[in-house]
Amino acid sequence: MTTSDRTDVYFTAEFIDGPLAGTAEERVLVRGTHDEKLSEVALVDGIESIFRYFAVDTREVAGKLHVRYTFNEPASDTYTSEDENE
């Protein structure tokens, strides 16, 4: 009996722009493939917002799939600060 390598079911999602720019997270492959579109929930100025991203390219780094995602602003919640002091 062989055991499968658990790392082959994960990929790294890299957010290249928008409110999550410069961040990355490990996600699960669904049916062996990455998500073409992602919806991420995050707090901005204490307000929960939904941000939409879509995949732009993939590459392999040290044997692991990395997918770069770009921000889809028209489909996302507004995230600009409404600070009175700005």
Image (cartoon, grey):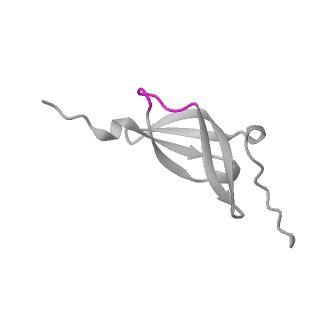
Q: What segment is highlighted magenta in the picture?
A: 30-36
Residue 42 is situated, as x and y percent measured from the top left of the image, at 63, 54
In this rendering, position of residue 24 left or right of residue 42 = left
In this rendering, position of residue 18 left or right of residue 81 = left
User: In this rendering, is residue 14 above or below 54?
Assistant: below
What residue lies at 30% left-to-right and 40% top-to-bottom? 6
Q: How many marks?
A: 0
What residue lies at 72% left-to-right and 64% top-to-bottom? 45
What residue lies at 58% left-to-right and 33% top-to-bottom? 57
- Front in this rendered view, residue 12 or 27: 27
User: In this rendering, is residue 5 above or below 46?
Assistant: above
Can you say which quadrant of the picture contains the N terminus?
A: top left
- Front in this rendered view, residue 15 or 48: 48
What residue lies at 60% left-to-right and 46% top-to-bottom? 40
User: In this rendering, is residue 71 above or below 35?
Assistant: below
Residue 82 is situated, as x and y percent measured from the top left of the image, at 83, 63
Is most of the magenta stretch helix, strand or loop?
loop
Residue 18 is situated, as x and y percent measured from the top left of the image, at 70, 49
Which residue is outermost to the left? 1
Q: Is residue 21 visible?
A: no
Which residue is outermost to the bottom? 85
Residue 33 magenta: yes
Q: Is residue 34 visible?
A: yes
Can you say which quadrant of the picture contains the C terminus?
A: bottom right
Which residue is outermost to the top? 31
In this rendering, position of residue 37 left or right of residue 6 = right
Residue 62 magenta: no
